[in-house]
Amino acid sequence: MPTTLAPVSVAELKDVAKRLRAHIVEMVYQAQSGHPGGSLSAVELGVSLFWNHLRCDPANPGWPDRDRFILSKGHATPFYYSLLAERGYFSTELLAKFRTLGSPLQGHPSMSAAPGIEMSSGSLGQGLSFAIGHALSGRLDRRDFRCWVMMGDGELNEGQVWEAAMAVPHFDLGDRIIAMVDRNGIQNDGFGDNIMKIHPPEMWRGFGWHVIECDGHDMAAVDQALSEAERPHEKPRVVVAYTVKGKGVSYMENNPSFHGKAPTKDQLAQALEEIAGGLK
Amino acid sequence: MTAPTAPAAATREAYPVALSELVEQGIDVVALDADLSASTMGYQFGEKYPERWHSVGIAEANMVGIGAGYAATGKTAFIASFASFLPGRCFDQIRTSVAQPKGGLNVNCVASHGGVTVGEDGASAQAIEDLALMTSLIPFDVIVPADFESARQAIIAVGKTTRPSYVRTGRPKVAAIYDRSFRFEIGRANVLRPGSDVTLIACGILVGIALDAAAHLAADGISARVIDMATIKPIDRDAVLAAARETGAIVTAEEHQTHGGLGTQVARVLAETLPTPVAFVGVDRYGTSGKWDELLGYFELTPGRLSAAAKDVIARKR
């Protein structure tokens, strides 16, 4: 069974990240709706994970021993679908159907609608709980897969996240569940600090987790953080990746209005040019 | 049918019995509770199969998600709490994580302490909205058994489908209606008493009350059919339509609001196919403390009220 592609070089991962960013802005432009900001912020986490860490087989998405990637921040579908397509779960041509009538690529993920979609999400805060069910089942069946759960920082406002956060160490699932937080600082209504000020590392530590912090756009740092998260530790691990909402497109970066807004035609051209030029 | 000789038992007592039977039959059952396992009786399953049962603490939303994750790996998941909290505390989680994935995930909710017969705990513990919520979820089967035996068989039945389900059980011990010769089927009603003037369609604890009402009505010369409509969804259309054709008047009775529960399901079948006078008996206000049987009186979930409703609806026949 194929597992990870590791080791893939940082240079190669950066190339994949560029392709993902281009897909993201094109998909949202074409659909004229969707969530580019929190998709662009998650790119390095996703690419490092899917190329170097996630044990998976895109040709066999139901492989019972696969690692699960659970996108809890379900609005980041432009990111998620391009990640799955670039990794080979389905054709990149399908990305053009994003958010269209009858498409398997709904605005928010619909479980099993397309290969690799592990969970229906979009209502925030539910992914970590879902992962606990997978992990307990894996333990019961003596399978050693891991569940990687990606959350947004705004999503941490949801109480259910903390119900699940306290349950992971309680059930001793640290070697089966790895959490990732895309700490981009912006949520639907604006800057998180103005809406609900939170301190993710302290909160996770308080719930009994080992916190690994990294620059979420430094591919080498992300890759290292995920490697550290895979290593055994007495506590479950959460990677808090400090990111920029809209990363890679100047007018979207740190701009709350691009949480859920599509670019114009001119803006798309500019975005693609900036993405091709690479991260500053 | 022969009169059952089993002692009175609460429908919730059937839960751990049914789960154990499912495991013994080779079904890959896992079960979760949210710190009410001494009341849902889930702890008894946990004592028998500790590797298959977990308490998640007082965290119903998390419980639903964990159940969904289990089901996504192929397990037959059961989750349990009070009917006021499951679905009340976690409806969105049930909708998104359980109901919406293709065909629904195999998560079976067994909610105890349904209706107002919870007793002294008062309004916050009395579930009179759960059936409305759960019948709104497309893939769900929704079942309200009337006694221990039907509850045991209903829980086994939902454990053998891959669909999600909601089974409501009750707190008080109730008289047995069925014996072991009974065969429960999801979606099939049971005519417990023949009748030609009116039909009383009930679920849960109201089934026994409807049988008492029918006896009272017989004394007044009225022939009342009694149907145990344990499955609210999918409802047994044939049984409803036969009752309408053959008796021409219907009373529905449930330990739930008249909006969104059994009465609503029955009325829809009739409105679509065979409009028939219906009287709805249920609970349309929030409750109070009291012993469970006192509460039945307080809310007028009594043979007397069912009999009066039957006479009213007979008078409305054309």
Image (spheres, rainbow, N blue to C red):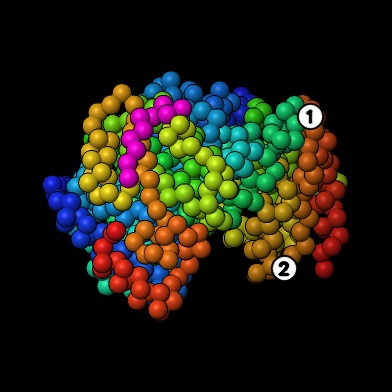
Give the magenta part as a residue range.
A205-215
Amino acid type, mark 1: Ser
The secondary structure type at the circle numbered 2 is loop
Name the one closer to the observer, A246 or B33.
A246
Residue B296, horizontal then vertical, whole percent: 78, 35
The image quarter in which residue B4 lies = top right
Task: Let me know if marks 2 and 1 both belong to one chain.
Answer: yes
Query: In the rendering, at what x and y percent does residue B75 appear?
Result: 36, 41
In the rendered image, residue A221, in percent from the top left (x then y), is placed at: 25, 43
- Mark nearer the N terminus (2 vs 1): 2
For disc 2, the neighbor class at 10 Å (few under 14, some 14 to 19, many from 20) is: some
In the depicted structure, whether residue B245 falls above or below residue B254:
below
Q: Chain of mark 2?
A: B
The chain carrying label 1 is B
- Give the left or right position of residue B316, taking residue B54 as reference: right
- Left or right position of B135 against A226: right
Residue A216 placement (x, y as % from top left): 33, 48
In three-dimensional space, the C-alpha distance between marks 2 and 1, rounded to whole angstroms, equals: 38 Å
Q: Quadrant of residue B314?
A: bottom right
Disc marking residue B244: none
Q: Which residue is mark 1?
A: B289
User: Residue at position x 26%, y 67% from top?
Assistant: A277
> Which one is in front in this view, the residue at disc 2 or the one at disc 1?
1
Q: Amino acid at mark 2?
A: Pro
Question: Element under label 1?
Answer: loop
Do the residues under discs 2 and 1 have CB atoms within 8 angstroms?
no
The answer to if A184 sits in the magenta stretch is no
Q: Quadrant of the N terminus of chain B?
A: top right
Which residue is at 23% across, 32% downward? A231
Task: Tell me the residue that label 2 is attached to.
Answer: B275
Query: Quarter of the image holding residue A87?
Result: bottom left
